[in-house]
Each structure stands twice: as C-alpha cells, then as structure tokens.
Image (cartoon, rainbow, N blue to C red):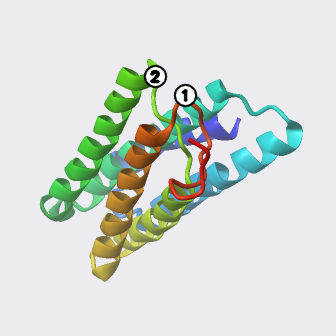
Amino acid sequence: MLVIFRLLAAPALIALGLTAPQAGVMAAVLLSLAVLSDIFDGVIARRLQVVTPNLRRWDGRADVIFWLGAVVALGLMHPELIRLTAPLVLALVVLEMLNHAVSFVRFRREASPHHWLSKLFCLFLWALFVQLFVTGAAGSLLWITFGLGVLSQVEAFVITLRLKAWRCDVPSAFRMKA
C-alpha cells in the first residue's frame, strides 16, 4: 500500500502544480509523506516477511515515477528552475537508464541494488525538493544533491558490473559478495 501511495502521490503533486502553483508548502508536505512511505515500506515488508524481488522492483519503479512527478510539479510551480536543473536531471536520468540497460544485457532483468548511497541521495533529494517547493530557490544543496546522485549511479553501475548473478538489495559496491 505504501508503494501504491507513492504512485498516487506523483499525479497528486502534478495536480497541485496545475491547480495551485502557490501551494509549495502543501507540495512539500505531500513529498515528505511519500518519502516517509519509501523509508517505511521496506522496514514493514521485512518485518512482515513479504519482501520479494518483484516487490523490490516495483518499489524502485514507484520511486522513479514519484520523483518524475515531483520534477513535473516543481516545473509547473517554479518554471524558472527548469533551465537550471534540466541538464542535471537529464544527466541523472541517462545514468539510471544506462545502468538498467547494462543490467538487462547481463541478467535480462532491471537493476535493483537499493544500496545505501541511493538512500542517502534520496534523503538529500527530499531536502532539496522541500527547499525548492517552498522557496523556489536553489543553493548549494542542489550541487551537493547532484553530486550524491552521480556517486549513487556510479556505485549502482559498479554493483551491476561486479555481480555474477542478478540480485536486489546490495548494500554497497564495497561490501558485497559478487
């Protein structure tokens, strides 16, 4: 249900951007609830012992859809940010797609490492989006977050290359059994 909540939060954010472009605080609250759902869905699934590779893949897909919805909503609320952030977003999307392509070539499955650096990137991304929704201004947090995003994608790529067989939930490229 928490994964579905994130999937529904994406169009809700876009609707806020279309109908209430001055609703930055409301968007930040919805964004925060969705990020909390992302944090707790794995904890709850492990506690209930319902974690499956399929569920983890859908969790990753929901994350991508949710963050794309947040990007669209942000662009609707603060169109001036598009020029500044578009090249950075495009770079991260290309890196993500490249990793998935390599995983498909190697394993016939999409990448799903769920590594710790990706979780750190998500927390910084949340803080950045809250700042951008509420203030409409980017600062040094933009560049720190982008740097973490690139490092996270590089680590995901290293994980994909080092694995001998596909698996999800690889905590780090530096502490893994290939």
Tell me if I can see residue 67 in this picture.
Answer: no
Element at label 2: helix
Query: Label 2 amino acid?
Result: Phe
Picture disc at residue 107:
2
- The CA distance from mark 1 to mark 2 is 7 Å
Q: Residue at x 87, y 38 (%)?
A: 48
Identify the residue position indicated by label 1 in the image.
Answer: 165
Q: Secondary structure at mark 1?
A: loop
Q: Is residue 27 above or below residue 165?
A: below
Query: As rendered, which of 61 and 66 lies closer to the eye?
Result: 61
Few, some or many residues within 10 Å of mark 2 (<14, 14–19, 20+): some
In the image, what residue type sits under mark 1?
Ala
Location of the N terminus (image quadrant):
top right
Left or right relative to 150: residue 15:
right
Image point (42%, 54%), residue name:
155
Above or below: residue 104 compared with residue 155: above
x 44%, y 18%: residue: 108
Residue 3 percent location from the top left of the image: 63, 37
- Dot label at residue 63: none
The 10 Å Cα crowd at callout 1, few under 14, some 14 to 19, many 20 or more, is: few
Q: Are the residues flagged by discs 1 and 2 in contact, CB closer than 8 Å?
A: yes
